[in-house]
Amino acid sequence: MAVAREIGLAIVGCGTIGRIRGILARDYPGIRWLGLCDVNEGLGQRLKEDTRADFFTTDYEELLARPEVDAVIIATDENNHAGPTIMAAGLGHALFIEKPLATDARESLTILRAIEAAGVDAVLGYTQRFRRRFLAVKERLVTGQIGDVHSVVTRAFMNRMVPIATVRRTQNRRNLTPMVVSGTHSLDMSLWLMEGKQPASIYARSTDKVLSKWGTKDSTFGIFTMDDGTIFSMNISWGLPEVWPGSVYGLEIGIVGTEGVIDIEDTHRDLVMATNVAQGGGYVPDGYNPPARHVDFLTSYPPGDLHMGQLWGPMREETVSWYQRLCMDQPTPHATAQDGHRNLVLTMAMDLSARRGAEVALPVDLEELMED
């Protein structure tokens, strides 16, 4: 593959997602240099060996200051994005940031302002945008094939492996809620499909009968009213049992327009395997051991599926597309840093409405979002 230019890539965070993107970087011809960082030296050294990376350190400042670096992937835990992202932006590096920008709305705004001030190209990791079915839906919407959208319903069901694996890594759990961590994916998808419509208010409620002992909620349901009167129901539960056959996400979206409707069933129940052989979980961060499952919704792991030692699916498409964006100036459907900040604020506004039991007008003051 001919490339317009080669880049030096730094990956900060060598866990599940950093590993996937690093393996793909190893095989992309436009990556001339690869450097890695993780506070877990054993984890990082394993990825260095597997990717034949040029450099590894446990200090992200040392990595980002290397003269070889042109672009950076931020794949740390959700609470630790600010430091490396702001430094990378200040050095003029292109950025790929795993969602969310931050788990504090004020910190998220600080990161966004640093990115905008530096004028760097920065995208967020919203992998669902690279699914073929959603790209097909997007095309039908932008070409007006169902008219003006006026009603949208989104429902996401998730195995509780994700919240348990997420919150166990930190005591700073206040904002690690279903909406902020995972509902943000279906929120981003819905707003991307409704591009141009701005949320004007939100009313939401939450419940925590199962995951309260982990310091988070089970479910959050809400209704957005958009600035043009469109109504948007956004619901997520990530409290399903760990043995639920879906590895992570089961999503349903209904989009009603003045001239038609699009109904999306993305629960992965069309491909089911039942076996006496114990199945591992789809999302298994280092040190987390979920119970075995014996029924599996195949293809339900959002990054994709392994075959011949390679990952095939939307995360491959998303990652390689970003490398092409950098090396070949190719336009891509990635979420922007502005999209990422907006998504965080809206998910936190849902949590604020649920805490108050009252409708919240949008846009909302960031101090309100962070109040106890």
Image (cartoon, rainbow, N blue to C red):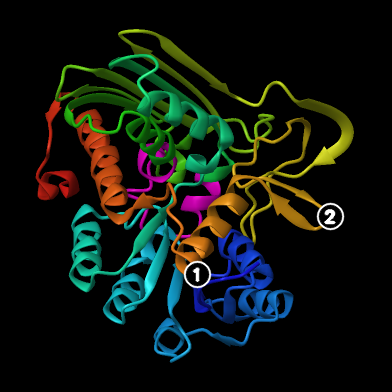
- Give the mark toward the camera: 1 or 2: 1
* Quadrant of the image containing the N terminus: bottom right
Rendering coords of residue 22 (x, y %) = 61, 68
Please give the range of residues in magenta: 163-183
Rendering coords of residue 146 (x, y %) = 38, 14
Rendering coords of residue 304 (x, y %) = 66, 45
Considering every residue shown, the one lying at the far top of the view is 259
Labels 1 and 2: the sequence-earlier one:
2
Find numbered disc 1 in the image and state the secondary structure of the residue it sits on: helix
Q: Which mark is residue 327?
A: 1
Q: How many marks?
A: 2
Does residue 174 belong to the magenta stretch?
Answer: yes
Does residue 275 belong to the magenta stretch?
Answer: no
Q: Which mark is residue 348?
A: none
Rendering coords of residue 244 (x, y %) = 66, 29
Query: Which three-letter amino acid code belongs to the residue tagged 1?
Result: Cys
- Measuring 69% from the left and 75% from the top, which residue is drawn there? 51
- The residue that mark 2 highlights is 308
- Measuring 71% from the left and 53% from the top, which residue is drawn there? 311
Answer with the quarter of the image where residue 298 lies: top right
Answer with the quarter of the image where residue 102 lies: bottom left
Classify 10 Å Cα crowding around label 1: few (below 14), some (14-19), many (20 and above).
some
Find numbered disc 2 in the image and state the secondary structure of the residue it sits on: loop
> Which is nearer the eye, 235 or 8?
8
- Horizontal arrangement in the rendering, residue 168 relative to residue 290 (left or right): left
Above or below 315: residue 354: above
Query: Which three-letter amino acid code belongs to the residue tagged 2?
Result: Met
- Measuring 44% from the left and 90% from the top, which residue is drawn there? 66
Q: In this rendering, does residue 171 appear at all?
A: no
Separation of marks 1 and 2 at Cα, in angstroms: 27 Å
Q: In this rendering, does residue 24 appear at all?
A: yes
Above or below 15: residue 131: above
